[in-house]
Amino acid sequence: MIERALISVFDKTGLEDFARGLDDLGVELVASGGTAGYIAGLGLPVTRVEDLTEVPEMLGGRVKTLHPRIHAGILARRDVPDDVAALSEHDIEPFDLVCVNLYPFRQITARKDVREEEAVEMIDIGGPTMLRAAAKNFVHVAPVCSPGQYAPLLGELDRDGDLSRETRRRLAAEAFSHTAAYEASIAGWFADRETFPPQLIVSLEKIADLMYGENPHQRAAYYAEAGVRRHLLSRAEQLGGRELSFNNLNDLDAARAVLREFELPCAVIVKHANPCGCALASTIDEAYQKALAADPVSAYGGVVALNRRIDGGLGERLASQFIEVLIAPEYTDDALEALRTKPATRILADRERRGATPGERDFRRVLGGLLVQDADTDVDDREGMTIVAGSTPDEAAWGDLLFAWRVVKHVGSNAIVIAKDLQTIGIGAGQMSRVDAVRLAVEKARELGHDLAGATLASDAFFPFADGPQLALDAGVTAIVQPGGSKRDDEVIAAVEAAAALMVFTSRRHFRH
């Protein structure tokens, strides 16, 4: 039975209804500090913690619930005679429910330029201690740590007169997860000055259940790192279409990563986590038409990402295509009207235009652990690049070189991107041999009717031999951008010079396995 509740919450959301509901059920309310004042202000009877402990709050509120009369009342096992006798000997009444939410450490430390002293004051000591104690003794004490739990618990108590063991066990699991995530965020903040600390504690919060994983027989959900300033869907609003799937989110992440490379109007179409069409233009309408024309066959059923507003005309053209997910900063009303005629298309408004957050890390699951690395988020420019063959490029040539180089970074390795006039015209992705990646990109361009004469080729890593570049040069490519660094760089340079072509070394590779 729930006869006595201890409440100590920072966030008062939903507390009025919860406190009134418990009072209506005849539950005695005990509360600390500001929580007691809040409940008393509702006109409800409440016993203050300091009246039980006979010790006033001290150290600016740091010590108020850390007392045997509190923790004995939480930890006492009602089916252990010695525990019951100890309570009786010291005139301590047990608690049946402990409702605690913690100081907002993550919210405070997520702010820019937060002072260390301010962050430290948001490290809750008493709250996690009470929650853990209640969760350990869940058979007798219900731990409550979230306003979302209030209404279901009141409903069960009103219906059944008590909480089932299953409910209590679930509450314990949620309480321990809650305190573990809280401690992880604190540990992460302290370890933030060390990129790869000896122990890496990652805390994740579930954002959404997904219909299934990559395949229908796999269960799936989307989690975000606790405390991050933004995540994949944090600033994305769904305006129409079906529920997002595992594969949708994976492709959406890839598409948004490409968009972050460019300021000009950009359209990118992603299929199976690889861009199959990308283009820049003076208008977003033209950029989309070029991106679609890059590989219209592969674009079928892809994710389309645009970095400018979609108006009615473009909305109608997009609605005529089979698109799994469409994301753009905003839509005109007539664009939305046209797009919503395709109920299968997930329509997202991207309210976030910022670039990547410095210090982001990538995680790759392997057997029994994680591979952790810095995220490859830098936007490369011509600074630091070296012309190793041919004459200095003009601005148009530099535009294609940088465009192809920024796109190839997001293509699965071994990766080749052929571009012309700020449009991809041939992409070779995920090949075990780099020469095969070149061959695939050339063949795709020819198959789709693109003119390779004067095109630019980007390779995500160096060419180990001259055979790959030679294939491209023979097909009409006149500019190549690649990291360099092969033992046979001289042979590759010689092949490019013999073709009177241009080649730039970036001295940086972009593998994406």
Image (cartoon, helix red, strand yellow):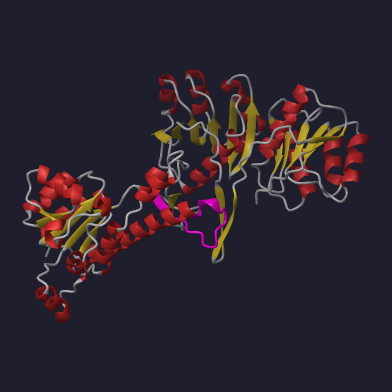
Q: Is residue 302 magenta?
A: no
- Quarter of the figure with the N terminus: bottom left
**215 left or right, relative to 22:** right
User: Exactly how many numbered labels are in the figure?
Assistant: 0
* In this view, 192 is above or below 98: above
Residue 121: give x, y in percent of width and height.
35, 49
Which residue extends farthest front? 59
Task: State which quadrant residue 267 falls in.
Answer: top right
Residue numbers of the magenta segment: 191-207
**229 left or right, relative to 13:** right
Residue 16: give x, y in percent of width and height.
15, 44
Of residues 47 and 23, the one drawn nearer to the viewer in this rendering: 47
Task: State which quadrant residue 481 falls in.
Answer: top right
Task: State which quadrant residue 372 falls in.
Answer: bottom right
Q: Is residue 496 visible?
A: yes
Of residues 299 and 1, the one drawn nearer to the viewer in this rendering: 1
Q: Can residue 208 be seen in this view?
A: no
* In this view, 454 is above or below 275: above
Residue 417: give x, y in percent of width and height.
72, 38
Of residues 297 and 456, the one drawn nearer to the viewer in this rendering: 456
Of residues 295 and 251, the one drawn nearer to the viewer in this rendering: 251
**315 left or right, relative to 6:** right
Query: At 71% across and 32% down in the image, what residue appears?
Result: 402
Query: At 23% across and 50% down in the image, what residue appears?
Result: 9
Residue 434: give x, y in percent of width and height.
77, 48
Query: At 46% across and 43% down in the image, what residue appears?
Result: 231
